[in-house]
């Protein structure tokens, strides 16, 4: 107990920084694994196609990896839910 009190001036700020870094990493991971992010990208891609900014070939090329990512994210989310249930 005394050791913790004596090292608190140095370890306190370091512990706080570690906690902040872990929290940021969690938030980034949550955002990256959110299917809504990919769904929004698909919607934006469709809008670009409809506006004539890209042609059908470019749309298909960009859509395929997004659909794969969306499928993977949904499968991972289902696995987490089933594992936690």
Image (tube, helix red, strand yellow):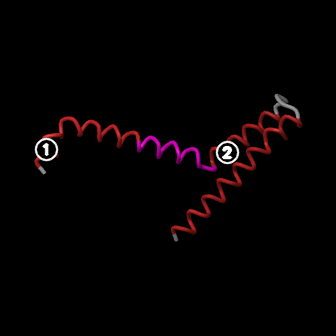
Camera-side residue of 18 and 35: 18
Q: Residue furthest front?
A: 3
The percent coordinates of residue 27 (x first, y second) are 48, 44
Query: 58 above or below 26?
Result: above
- Report helix, strand or loop for mark 1: helix
Quarter residue 64 falls in: top right
Residue bearing the label numbered 1: 5
Disc 2 vs disc 1: which is toward the camera? 1
- The residues bearing labels 2 and 1 have C-alpha atoms spaced at a distance of 48 Å
Residue at screen point 68% across, 54% down: 72
Residue at screen point 68% across, 46% down: 39
Camera-side residue of 11 and 60: 11
Quarter residue 81 falls in: bottom right
The percent coordinates of residue 75 (x first, y second) are 66, 59
Residue 38 numbered tag: 2
Mark 1: few, some, or many residues within 10 Å (few <14, many ≥20)? few
Please indicate whether residue 4 sits to the left or right of residue 28 in the image: left
Residue at screen point 82% across, 35% down: 49
Residue at screen point 79% across, 42% down: 63
The span shown in magenta is 22-35
**Does residue 44 belong to the magenta stretch?**
no
Magenta stretch: dominant SS? helix
The percent coordinates of residue 25 (x first, y second) are 47, 42
Mark 2: few, some, or many residues within 10 Å (few <14, many ≥20)? some
The percent coordinates of residue 28 (x first, y second) are 51, 42
Q: Residue furthest top?
A: 53
If you read the primary sequence from the N terminus, does the residue marked by circle 2 or circle 1 appear first?
1
């Amino acid at each position: 107990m005394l050791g913790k009190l004596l090292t608190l001036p140095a370890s306190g700020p370091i512990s706080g920084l570690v906690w902040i870094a872990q929290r940021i990493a969690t938030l980034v991971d949550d955002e990256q694994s959110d299917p809504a992010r990919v769904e929004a990208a698909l919607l934006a891609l469709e809008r670009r196609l409809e506006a004539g900014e890209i042609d059908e070939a470019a749309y298909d090329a960009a859509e395929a990896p997004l659909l794969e990512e969306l499928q993977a994210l949904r499968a991972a989310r289902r696995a987490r839910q089933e594992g936690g249930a």
